[in-house]
Image (tube, rainbow, N blue to C red):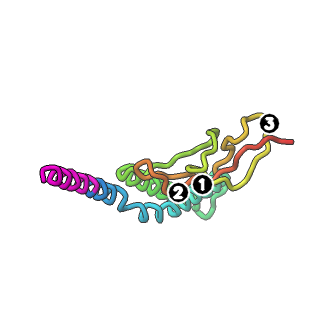
Amino acid sequence: MKDKVLRTYADMENIMDRTKRETDNSKKFAIQNFAKSLLDVVDNLDRASSVVKESFAKIDASKDTTRAVPLLKTLIEGVEMTEKQLAEVFKKFEVEKYDPTNKVFDPHRHNAVFQVPDNTKAPNTVAVVLKAGYTLHDRIIRPAEVGVIIKAE
């Protein structure tokens, strides 16, 4: 009888521990789908920022008869502030961006999209990152899309 009581008590403790672990994980990763949905927004903001900056660099302010330079400058500042604010929110909720450039290819963290023949670097190394990867509490929520080095023939 005593043995039965001890086993039942141990089972109950195990169930309580497992339930606590599952509850903690549920709280920790509840925003995973929401965060994943925002990653495309981050990518689009990044693309918009780079295109606008590139366009702004090509404009000759002395020949600006339409007064587009101040508007473009304001647009750049707005996009940069939005990017910064989104990065702060991600940091608060432990959504982190990672860039695997020049690191060894890891199929659990990277999605190889193409191969780059190159004899100057070690094979199976990430050469190009098309889309950065993201983690939530060290769990991959989006693998990085990369180009991987192979030996050139």
Mark 2 Cα within 10 Å, few/some/many (few <14, many 20+)? some
Between discs 3 and 1, the one toward the N terminus: 3
Is residue 118 positioned above or below 81 on the image?
above
Disc 2 marks which amino acid?
Arg
Q: Nearer the viewer, residue 111 or 2?
A: 2
Q: Are marks 3 and 2 in contact (CB under 8 Å)?
A: no
SS for callout 1: strand
Whole-angstrom CA distance, mark 3 to mark 1, is 24 Å
Q: Are marks 2 and 1 in contact (CB under 8 Å)?
A: yes
Q: Nearer the viewer, residue 47 or 120?
A: 120
Quadrant position of the N terminus in the picture: bottom left
Disc 3 marks which amino acid?
Asn
Whole-angstrom CA distance, mark 2 to mark 1, is 9 Å
- Residue sitting at 50 percent across and 63 percent down? 41
x and y percent of residue 74 in the render?
49, 58
Is residue 29 positioned above or below 150 on the image?
below
Segment colored magenta: 1-18
- Residue sitting at 87 percent across and 42 percent down? 153
In the picture, measured across the screen, residue 41 lies left or right of residue 32, that is: right
In the picture, measured across the screen, residue 65 lies left or right of residue 26, that is: right
SS for callout 3: loop
Q: Is residue 8 magenta?
A: yes
Q: Nearer the viewer, residue 18 or 107?
A: 18
Disc 1 marks which amino acid?
Lys
In the rendered image, which residue does mark 2 sit on? 142
In the rendered image, which residue does mark 3 sit on? 119
SS for callout 2: strand
Between discs 2 and 1, the one toward the N terminus: 1
Whole-angstrom CA distance, mark 3 to mark 2, is 29 Å
x and y percent of residue 118 in the render?
78, 40
In the rendered image, which residue does mark 1 sit on? 131
- Residue sitting at 53 percent across and 63 percent down? 40
